[in-house]
Image (cartoon, rainbow, N blue to C red):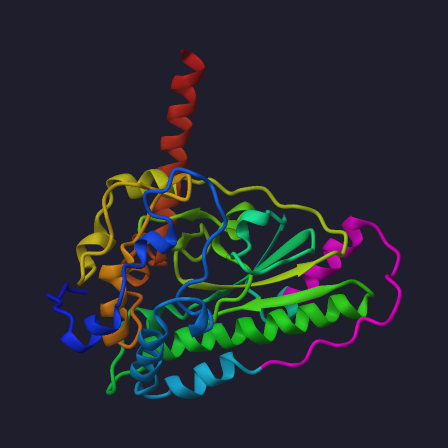
């Protein structure tokens, strides 16, 4: 996929009425909760018109409107009117994972709730976060971005969001049928829960230079949904396999990004030094390109034929570093 020069339309830039980077906490050295942002209700952030324009563009792609419509349709949560069933955390955890994977999810992880993952102005009282992952069709997402003639890529984005919506609500209702509280938090519209940090803690993978997760199973080719609950569960561990180290010296996504929004160095964001994508550069292209996804499509980790070799290479590199540390 070759990079094309991008110049935003004046009418698009006119809707970017203020910088989104300070709202995201770029440059802040103090840890805090995230502020409501793009994909939240438009009265909670200054980009409502830009958000609406983005939806207008993406709905023009063949097949995308139907898929994104499905992403907003879900069953109602059933009443929580029965006492909690008895059982151990291990029993509930095993049954929950079996149910989720048999339903629609391709990945399931669990971690304890951290209040820093809850957007300002929202509250979540449940002690556990279940993260669900939904794999893209690789042959589809490599056709991102989409347009009014070819909607294959963005349609698969909508398809995975729709799977996430249905799966998260279905799982929440299964948990509620066991007598425990549960709430669903699917994409694409953000709600109370920030999904990437709990996904990292739940063992889904590492944050990539492009601002998305990299997993050892699907690279960056997957979407997330979440469920919070008070059902007793068992926490997963982080999965560190070298993706972050690899990103330090890889420029595939940054070279392919038309608006050049992906930097080569980590930056301080709400008290954490991490990879960050420049919102003010990214979002005008995202809007006009009917969503994007170039960065996750070109990521070497997303390529099925490349990923096994990368895992082997990074495992060896980590083992060599560990050996050097032991020798010292």
User: Left or right: 88 with respect to 292?
Assistant: right
Q: Quadrant of residue 126?
A: bottom right
Q: Position of residue 41 (x, y in %)?
A: 47, 73
Residues in magenta, as a range: 74-100
Left or right, 203 with reference to 81: left
Q: Is residue 186 magenta?
A: no
Residue 176, given in percent of the width and then of the height, sits at: 77, 68
Quadrant assignment for the N terminus = bottom left
Residue 211 seen anywhere in this rendered image of the structure:
no
Residue at the far top: name it: 328
Magenta stretch encompasses residue 96: yes
Using the image, determine if residue 60 lies above or below residue 232.
below
Where is residue 185? Give x, y as percent. 57, 66
Quadrant holding the C terminus:
top left
Work out whether residue 288 can be spotted: yes
Point 47% across, 71% down: residue:
189
Looking at the image, residue 153 sits to the left or right of residue 68; the answer is left
Question: Which of 249/57 is in front?
Answer: 57
Q: Is residue 322 above or below residue 54?
A: above
């Amino acid at each position: 996929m070759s990079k094309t020069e991008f110049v935003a339309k004046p009418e698009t830039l006119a809707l970017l009425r203020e910088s989104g980077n300070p709202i995201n906490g770029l440059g802040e050295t103090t840890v805090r909760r995230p502020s409501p942002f793009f994909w939240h209700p438009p009265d909670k952030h200054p980009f409502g018109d830009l958000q609406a324009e983005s939806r207008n563009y993406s709905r023009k792609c063949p097949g995308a409107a139907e898929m994104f419509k499905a992403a907003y349709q879900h069953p109602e949560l059933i009443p929580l009117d029965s006492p909690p069933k008895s059982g151990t955390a291990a029993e509930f955890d095993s049954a929950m994972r079996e149910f989720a994977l048999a339903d629609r999810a391709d990945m399931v992880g669990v971690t304890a709730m951290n209040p820093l993952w809850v957007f300002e102005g929202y509250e979540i009282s449940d002690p556990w976060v279940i993260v669900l992952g939904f794999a893209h069709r690789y042959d589809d997402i490599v056709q991102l971005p989409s347009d009014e003639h070819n909607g294959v890529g963005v349609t698969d984005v909508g398809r995975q969001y729709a799977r996430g919506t249905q799966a998260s609500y279905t799982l929440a209702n299964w948990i509620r049928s066991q007598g425990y509280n549960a709430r669903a938090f699917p994409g694409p519209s953000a709600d109370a829960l920030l999904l990437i940090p709990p996904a990292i803690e739940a063992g889904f993978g590492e944050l990539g230079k492009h601002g998305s997760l990299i997993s050892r199973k699907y690279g960056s080719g997957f979407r997330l949904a979440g469920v919070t609950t008070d059902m007793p569960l068992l926490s997963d561990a982080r999965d560190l396999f070298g993706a972050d180290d690899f990103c330090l010296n890889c420029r595939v996504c940054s070279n392919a990004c038309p608006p050049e929004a992906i930097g080569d160095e980590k930056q301080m964001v709400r008290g954490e030094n991490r990879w960050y994508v420049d919102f003010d550069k990214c979002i005008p292209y995202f809007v006009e390109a009917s969503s994007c996804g170039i960065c996750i499509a070109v990521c070497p980790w997303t390529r099925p034929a490349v990923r096994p070799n990368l895992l082997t290479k990074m495992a060896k590199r980590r083992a060599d570093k560990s050996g050097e540390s032991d020798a010292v």
